Image (cartoon, rainbow, N blue to C red):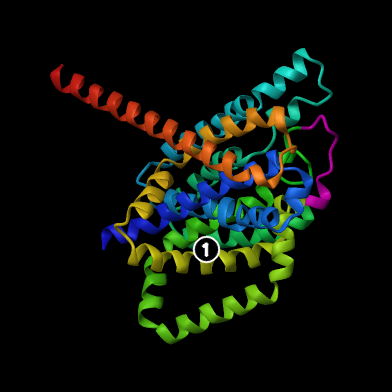
Amino acid sequence: MEIKRILLPDMLKGLAAVLMVQVHITELFIDNTGRESLWGKASLFLGGPFAAMVFMIVMGYFVARNKKTPKENLFRGIKIFALGLLLNIGLNFHLLWKILFDDWPYNPWHYVFGVDILYLAGISIVVLSALKRLKKGQEWASIGLFFLIIGFSGFMNSKIVVSETNYVLPFLAGNFSWSYFPVFPWLAYPVLGFFLSLQIERIKSFFLDQKIYSFILVAITAVLVLLFGEMGINTSINLPDYYHHTHGFAFWAIGLVFLWAILLFFVSTWFAETKLILFLCWIGKNITVFYVVQWLIIGNISTVIYQTKSMDNFVYYFFGIFAATVMFTFLYEKAKSKLTSNKRTSIQNA
């Protein structure tokens, strides 16, 4: 039972990582005709609520459950934020080289300070570490913060309008082209995951003890997701709207993710020991390394072929980059494990 309890969050993260790879390829490699095709729109949709939102919700869930001190979580958030800066430089290295030495007419700071998901993850962990310091009322504080962020996202996006030389406020909100995951609205999702982790036992009890009401809740959610499906899908495939969405799409996406999690719960329960499920869980456990590697590959290739390839090439790029990312992630984790083992041996022999 303990394995199944841990399996679902890791599986959700693993699938989110796979979907991130495919949507990055579509966004950066595929031409306009391909992106506007049925398959292109499906790719963008799958890379929307099922990817970044799932990743951030699960991250908040694990921050609430970890045994680190608030200070340790704070420094972890700062390190991930710094990793976001290094990753931006690394994935855009080829482009930055062209800007600096071949006079390509782009602003390099839009790429260095492009608000990607690792920046958001770092900021989120810092905020959640502050929530963990509360002796009482963490549940109320987290759910209140969730509704505050969702409710004020539209207002903040309309009010924060600055010049292109400002690279601080885009981390907070606004409709800037180089801000993909600003605090408003994206901080809401790790905060929601934090809240769900605190309530996980009550949630389990509800679904186990109140099966009729559970079924009604799932059915109502499914109906609402279908009723507002056109709005949700259109927002998901329109990248500026997706990155800077407001409360309507947020609640629709949360409903969709809720249904997605239920589906994967049954899948992870029925096929818990299969190699595919365990492989996805392995990716989920190593998602930071996996995410960094795939971006380093995709980002630097995109400088050469940016949005020039037809959708027919998608499969080759996806499987090639996915295989390379898995290989490098495996080798990195193996080397890291060996280094840790050698350190422990040295300490024991000292």
> Residue 253: x, y in percent?
62, 63
Q: Does the magenta stretch include residue 159?
A: yes
The magenta-colored residue range is 157-166
Residue at the (36%, 78%) spot, across then down = 208
Q: Mark 1 points at which residue?
A: 140
Residue at 40% across, 59% down? 8
Seen in the picture, residue 238 relative to 75 is either above or below; the reply is: below
Q: In this view, does 21 lie above or below 277?
A: above
Dominant secondary structure of the magenta stretch?
loop
Name the foreground residue: 106 vs 180.
106
For the point 33% across and 67% down, the residue is 270
> Can you say which quadrant of the picture contains the C terminus?
top left
Tally of numbered discs: 1
Q: Which element carries disc 1, helix, strand or loop? A: helix
Q: In this view, does 113 lie above or below 33?
A: above
Q: Where in the figure is residue 141, as x and y percent of width and height?
A: 54, 59
Query: Horizontal and vertical percent for residue 187?
Result: 61, 50
In the image: residue 306, left or right of residue 209: right
Q: Which of 263 and 206 is in front in this view?
A: 263
Q: Measured from the top left, where is residue 114 in percent x and y?
A: 69, 35
Residue with the most extreme front position: 312
From the viewer's perspective, tell me whether residue 269 is left or right of residue 87. left
Label 1: how many Cα within 10 Å (few below 14, some 14–19, many 20+):
few
What amino acid type should be assigned to the residue bearing mark 1? Trp
Visible residue check, residue 156: yes
Q: Is residue 181 visible?
A: no
Q: Quadrant of residue 317?
A: top right
> Residue farthest to the bottom?
212
Q: Quadrant of the N terminus?
A: bottom left
